[in-house]
Structures are given as structure tokens and as C-alpha cells.
Image (cartoon, rainbow, N blue to C red):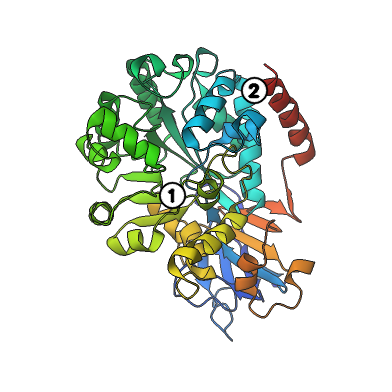
Amino acid sequence: MTTSEMIASPQSNQVQQTLWLKNADAVFTGNHEDATNGIVVQGDKIVELVASNNKPTVLIDQEIDLSGRVLIPGLINSHHHFYQTLTRCLPAALNKPLFPWLTSLYKVWQNLTPEMIAISSKLAALELMLSGATTVSDHHYVFTPNISNAIDIQIEALKSLGCRMHLTRGSMSLGESQGGLPPDSVVENEDVILKESERLITSYHERKDGAMIQLALAPCSPFSVSKNLMIESAQMAEQYDVLLHTHLAETEDENDFCLEKYGVRPLDYLEQCGWLNSRTWLAHGIHFTDEEIKKLGNAKIGIAHCPTSNMLLASGMCKTLDLQQAGCRIGLAVDGSASNDCSNMITEVRQSLLQQRLVYGAEKITAETVLGFATSGNASVFHRSDIGELSVGKQADLAIFNLNELRFSGVGDPLAALVICGGHRVEKLMVAGQWVINNFEHSAIDAEELKSLHGQLAKQLRNH
């Protein structure tokens, strides 16, 4: 370790150490820059990439040896349903396609409590962080009088974890009595939805570089909200300059529903509602025609690719490279735990590699390809230029994986091994220059205590 004059942070009275993270077996930057000999972090930013055989040009306060490890940008998740961690492998919903799966689970989810929202959000986010995610996202759309302030509860619960959060104010306004899929017990009045959406944006949404909390508007799907709500949500998103999110083209059933109810396919319906623009990102995006892919690309739509969920529900496979080539922004997501049953981001990277090779072959889908979906790809989905890469000026969001496990013994390519051999837990995680995970454990959260409480609440929800 060397010492030098420390530089005061412009945002606080604390001093900022300059750290050199060096000697990693592999470094994935998410771009074409050379950081073979590590990176230098000062405060909440990356200030230098150290190329092969080079040393830092700035004075270093601390050196951290990463021998036997892989260094990557913090992973980003672009679609989840945190509350669903309470209904993993629920017998009534097993072995069913999407629509029957949903109708089975709505009967359970209508009994969610504020404590369940808080604890499930904290556990899901912790799962993501322990698997290398520095930025988490959630699409919460189940609101009842008992949990009308669910997003406020989530924000408060996640603050203790130190992660970045992209939360969406979801909504359902079209219940069974109006021809929708969800029961009337979990739908809301549209005026309430819009008023609450506006309140949340003005209360929490941060626009600065390095933002820790951002909000988006997210009507659940074409079969659970009215056309009017889709249109008004798009108008509000433009008014407040926030993003839009929804499920689209996940199953053929959805296509049939839209054709029967609206007389058009889901993408045409989206266009009618004013959503076909770069402000929008879609979950799943499987069942598109070639012409629709061109239209999506021209609009620069974002897609949250969810391979495990799509395989578990037998929904199909996202045409990631076709969409990307057309002009779409492609990210990666774990989706809700009731349709994935795991919130592990690095294992989702592996699932993407395996699934997408069935579509595009082994030469086009590499470890770098799928890690790109989970880092710079998701950053572009969120319209963020400050995260998702190891590059000078970017936020110091880092994940460090230790290769000292049986599954990695004898590897030749450490980066490929992280994905192909099945990395599953991060050793160290840094968010905005702060170590939030050390030695495989979160610095502020007792995982065993959280798991115990979460398990009790899950049992309570099942037995309601």
C-alpha cells in the first residue's frame, strides 16, 4: 500500500481514498477498453483503467490484489416482481402456462400485507446483490387497499441494502368483470393510479448522474389495463420525462387476447397507445414477426430478455440478436420469482448463453455477449450513461467473483468460466464506491434472519 494526499469529496466532508484493483485473472469492461492491469477508483467513480503492463498514473492510497478473481461491472437487472419470492414453487401454480399460472396466483397475491412487501423486496434485492447486481429493478403491479403505498414501502426497505433501484409504478385497472384477466380485488381506479404515479415521480425520482432511485410507469399488460390508462400513462411519462414499462408479446395467448379484444396484435395496440418510442422497454418480447422487429428497432425500444422464465413457462425464446441488429436495446432480467424461482443474476447470464445458442449458435453467443446484455445492455435500456461499464467517469459499481471453487478448477479462460462453469455468488460488491458485500456477505443485512422472517411470511400467505 502507498499513501498520498487524500482528496475531499465535493458531496461530503469525508476523504476519498484512491483504490487500485489489480491482478485480476480476467477483467470484463463492457466495452473495448483495456483494463488488463486493473482499474482505479476514487470516491464514487472510476478514474483510470490500467492497460496491460502499465501502472496507474495517479497516486494510490490502497492496492487490492484480485488474483484468482474476475472483475466485471456491477450487473443490472431490468425486470422482476419482488413480492413473488413469497410464492416460489407454489403447488397450485406449478406446471402451467402463463394465463392459468396467473389466475392461480392472483388468488394468493390479493392477500399481501405491507410487511410482506417490505421483506420480500429486501430479500429479492439481496439475492440479486449476492449474485453480482448493483442495480435492481422491480415491476410491482398488485395493489389493494392494504398495500396502496407498496412503492414507498419498497424504497424504504431497499435503502438499507445500498443498491441502486429502478422501481416501476405498475397498475391493473381491467378486472374480470370488465373482461380482463385479474380478479377485481387487485385492480384500481384509474384516477387513483395516475395520481399515485405522479406523486411517486415527484417525490422520489432522481435525475442526477449517479442516481440511486429512479421511477418508471408500468401498466401491467394489455390484458389487465384499459386503453385509456395506457394512453394517459404514456402522456404522463412524456410530461415528467420518465420511462415506460410493460409486459408484451410473452405468449401466443396474449396475441389472441389482443386480436379478440382490440382487433390488432399487441405491438400495433402499443403503437395506438403512444408507446412506440425509445422511452419504452418491454419485458419478454418473444412473439414478434420480422416486420414487427423492424418497427421495434426503428423506435429504439428496450427489451428485458428473461430466458429462465420463458423456459419455465414454456413461452418461447426472445430473438435477441435480431432485435439488437434492428436497433433495439437488449437487456437481461431474472423476472419474478414465481416464474423463475431464483433471483440470481449471474446464473441468468448463463441461462441466456445456453438458450440463445439454440437460436443463434455457439459462435455468435459468447460469454461477452450475454455479460453485455446484463451490464451495458441494461444500462442502455434504462437510458443511463453512468453505469454498466468499467470506464473513466462511470460510477464505481463493481462485482468481483472468486474462482477458488471446485467448479472452476483447471479453467483456461477465466471470464468464460465465470459464465459457463456456473458462477453463482459474488465475493465483493461495490456500489458508488462503497463496499456493500465483503467475503460473500452483505455488510448491513443478516441474511439468515431475513430468510427466516421471509419464510414465515410466505407460509402465512400460502395458508391465508
If the image is split into quadrants, where does the N terminus sit? Answer: bottom right
From the top left corner, tell me how far across and down residue 95 is, in percent: 59, 38
If the image is split into quadrants, where does the C terminus sit? Answer: top right
Q: Which residue is mark 2?
A: 115
Type of amino acid under label 2:
Glu
**Mark drawn on residue 442:** none
In the image, residue 446 sits, relative to residue 156, either above or below, namely below
Query: In the image, what residue occupies the spot 41% across and 43% down?
Result: 250
| Between 125 and 313, the one nearer to me in the picture | 313
In the image, residue 410 sits, relative to residue 113, either above or below, namely below
Q: Which residue is mark 1?
A: 304
In the image, residue 356 sits, relative to residue 457, either above or below, namely below
From the top left corner, tell me how far across and down residue 322 is, in percent: 34, 62
* Residue 257 relative to residue 331: left or right: left
Badge 1 crowding class, 10 Å Cα cut-off, few under 14, some 14 to 19, many 20 or more, is many
Type of amino acid under label 1:
Ala
Dot 2 falls on a residue whose secondary structure is helix
Query: In the image, what residue occupies the spot 53% across and 18% down?
Result: 147
Badge 2 crowding class, 10 Å Cα cut-off, few under 14, some 14 to 19, many 20 or more, is some
